[in-house]
Image: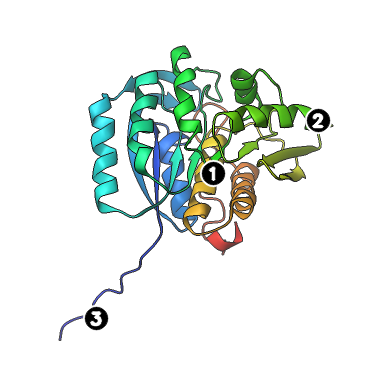
């Protein structure tokens, strides 16, 4: 007798446009792990291949613009892309190519302006910063950490006034919202304040600080988690809240891998009953 036909599912589809981390903790590898954990089918456009591990970045090769464009067109031609996450784009030419690819895309875009790795290695060419303006104009949400915000805006967001000034810089360039992450901001040492700012509303997410050294991949994880939740239909504030919660979980039980400080752990809760809807 014939077997029972498979029961297909129709998961939401999210696309990461970023660079590969050969060590697996950050970059496209972190994005796809995160999307899978949050119940989203993830696709990728590889912008650059990095030779990277928990100790640092040893090399990087940026793909030609025509290869980046071909990957995007292949995905866009076949899949209903419910959200896009942008990560390490490396060069001005790559940034411009991605902006051109997204010119006709009307879904949510989460832009993580990756400039420097956790190890301190620079990941964005100096001349690529200005090219980002075209992408900020497409961004549903930008997710800079405090150091990236200062490098871009000239303002270190360590007070409500500074947060507002930094957010205005992103709004002036067309971004719909900005999440100014507080992990690099020294407070009383006991809390981390992440601030979501839109032109009409400010929402703060205050959580106990996790005394973590294995933070490799945390920024990629947060931005891809927000993209995944947007792909599943969350509103922006809920997507950010759930993204922060998942990222905190990966930091609280890090992966003891490699000879460096380790990495965030995208397998947190596997086998322990954790489900994406609890993130």
View extreme (bottom): residue? 1
For mark 3, what is the residue? Answer: 4
In three-dimensional space, the C-alpha distance between marks 1 and 2, rounded to whole angstroms, equals 25 Å
Secondary element at image label 2: loop
Comparing labels 3 and 1, the label whose residue is closer to the camera: 3
In three-dimensional space, the C-alpha distance between marks 3 and 1, rounded to whole angstroms, equals 37 Å
* 99, 225: nearer the viewer: 99
Secondary element at image label 1: loop
Secondary element at image label 3: loop
Q: In screen coordinates, is 197 left or right of 219?
A: right
The answer to which of marks 3 and 1 sits earlier in the sequence is: 3
For mark 2, what is the residue? Answer: 187
Q: Position of residue 68 (x, y in %)?
A: 28, 32
Q: Is residue 246 visible?
A: yes
Q: Position of residue 31 (x, y in %)?
A: 45, 42
Quarter that holds the N terminus: bottom left
Q: Is residue 272 visible?
A: no
Q: Position of residue 230 (x, y in %)?
A: 51, 53
For mark 1, what is the residue? Answer: 265
* 198, 246: nearer the viewer: 198
């Amino acid at each position: 007798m014939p077997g029972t036909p498979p029961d297909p599912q129709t998961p939401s589809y999210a696309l990461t446009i970023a660079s590969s981390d050969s060590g697996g903790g950050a970059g496209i590898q972190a994005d796809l792990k995160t999307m899978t954990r949050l119940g989203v089918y993830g696709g990728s456009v590889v912008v650059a291949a990095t030779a990277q591990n928990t100790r640092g970045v040893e090399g990087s090769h940026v793909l030609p613009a025509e290869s980046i464009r071909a990957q995007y067109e292949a995905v866009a031609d076949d899949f209903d892309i419910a959200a896009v996450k942008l990560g390490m784009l490396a060069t001005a030419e790559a940034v411009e190519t991605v902006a051109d690819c997204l010119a006709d895309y009307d879904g949510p875009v989460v832009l993580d302006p990756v400039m420097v790795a956790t190890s301190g290695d620079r990941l964005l060419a100096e001349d690529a910063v200005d090219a980002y303006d075209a992408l900020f104009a497409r961004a549903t949400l930008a997710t800079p950490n405090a150091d990236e915000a200062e490098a871009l805006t000239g303002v270190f967001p360590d007070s409500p006034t500074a947060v507002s000034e930094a957010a205005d810089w992103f709004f002036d360039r067309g971004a719909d919202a900005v999440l100014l992450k507080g992990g690099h901001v020294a407070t009383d040492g006991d809390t981390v304040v992440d601030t979501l700012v839109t032109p009409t509303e400010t929402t703060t997410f205050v959580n106990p600080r996790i005394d973590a050294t294995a933070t490799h991949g945390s920024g990629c994880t947060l931005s891809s988690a927000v993209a995944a939740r947007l792909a599943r239909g969350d509103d922006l504030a809920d997507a950010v809240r759930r993204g922060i919660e998942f990222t905190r979980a990966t930091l609280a039980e890090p992966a003891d891998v490699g000879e460096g400080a380790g990495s965030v752990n995208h397998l947190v809760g596997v086998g322990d009953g954790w489900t994406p809807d609890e993130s």
